[in-house]
Amino acid sequence: MKFSPEEIYETVGMIAYEKLDIRTVTLGLSLWDCSDPDIKACGRKIGEKMRRKAEKLRSTALDIEAQYGLPIVNTRISLTPLAMVVPTREPEAFLDIAVAIDEAARDVGVNFVGGFSALVHKGETDVDKALIASLPKVLSTTERLCSSVSVASLRTGINIDACHMMGRILKETAEATAKDDGLGCAKLVIFANAVEDNPFMAGAFFGPGEPENAILVGVSGPGTVRRALEKLGPKANLGEVAETIKKTAFKITRAGELVGREMARRLGVSFGILDLSLAPTPAEGDSVAQILEVMGLGRAGAPGSTAALMMLNDAVKKGGSFASSSVGGLSGAFIPVSEDAAMIRAACEGAITIEKLEAMTAVCSVGLDMVAVPGDTSAETLAGIIADEMAIGVANNKTTAVRIIPAPGKKVGEMVRFGGLLGEAPVMPVSKVSAEGFIRRGGRIPAPLQGLRN
């Protein structure tokens, strides 16, 4: 891959002034060779493999960052879903595995590990149930481990029993981490149509269709897109806005693929994918919601927000896919409330509600992300929120997810604070109308007709 002097000069400006960075370089590791009926042996094998394969991950990222001047914010690991690897029906055994993984992650210097995961969109095995039951203890006693559970897909429909189960698990996990405002729930994602090559936490896992190992890159540049639109000015029409976003996404993608391929070459592993997702941070200027404001909206959540977000997402995908033949993961725009400075403002002012966020998730990368709700929200209401978001994903054949925090002891308008990239957020109101009768029916909502594609 060759770059012109003009491209290099422009990229330097994007880094220096517009917060362009490589948000994560994630090493995907297959654990199929680590399964063992002896749980201690299984944990040991997983830890040894992580240390062996990832021992140079952080140092290599730092070398490439110094060579190219592109900030690499996070190095992470994603694993084969643990429910497929650990042959046990005992939740306590999963805690032992989790501790082994967390210790290995600390030793190699990554900030998060994904893959403490179960895929239950059509039903749960005893192993799945054991992993899910262990989540409150696991997420409250480990530091780096992240979890995800798939409860719906286009081909299977929505597992309402699993939605209900996850509503209860969210309540238990929040209580187990009450001193940290329910932080454990920030490390737990519930998916429809989960993808196998997502490099972003907390929902990353390395799916069964992946190779032995691979580098997965998440590149992020909401500040770069915002600045490009500011230069374009307020008189440009929306077609010109979309074209500008597309061209900017092309440039961002080129920078990300350079880093990803070089990381893979130096580590001697496959280059997997480049995820185009615009992932914000709480830093001022590094915001997806601010892009919407530059487009002309007073705040994210104003009428027109869903249309603006659809255009943003589409233009990012078009520009990125033209720049790289290795686009994968989620690839779009994230709208996490607590991780986006302008989204936090919009939520505090009441400009955006959970219902409007839900509508916007029909056209963005993920779904209801890092949303805090009152601690007394019932498990059935949480399950209803999960089911609604899963329905958007299933009906539209796209990935959607829920990362919601029922903040213990907190009421509407109070703040939860997690720090770092996880940021802070106001507790948002939820409907008081009960969903209990619907959720307690249980069973599975059948797959929609568009799932019958063979």
Image: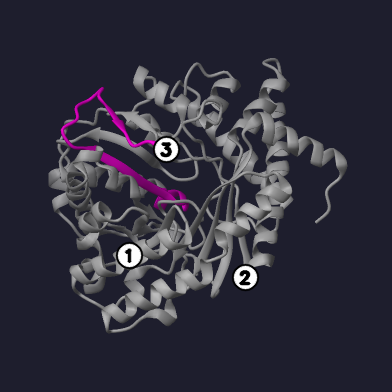
Query: Considering only order in the chain, which callout, 2 or 3, is on the residue closer to the N terminus?
Result: 2
Using the numbered discs, state the Cα–Cα distance from disc 3 to disc 2 in whole angstroms. Answer: 30 Å
At label 1, counting other C-alpha atoms closer than 10 Å, the crowd grade (few under 14, some 14-19, many 20 or more) is: many
Residue 322, compared with residue 230, is above or below; it is below
Q: Which circle marks residue 118 in the picture?
A: 1
Find residue 113 and report its horizontal and vertical position in percent: 42, 58
Residue visible at 49% across and 27% down?
A: 305
Tell me if residue 193 can be seen. no
Left or right: where 86 falls relative to 436: right
Q: Magenta part of the protein: which range?
A: 393-422
Residue visible at 51% across and 65% down?
A: 28
Residue visible at 30% across and 69% down?
A: 97
Secondary element type, mark 2: loop
Residue visible at 65% across and 60% down?
A: 263
- Name the amino acid, label 1: Ala
- Name the amino acid, label 2: Val
Q: Which quadrant holds residue 178?
A: top left
Mark 1 vs mark 3: give the one in front: 3
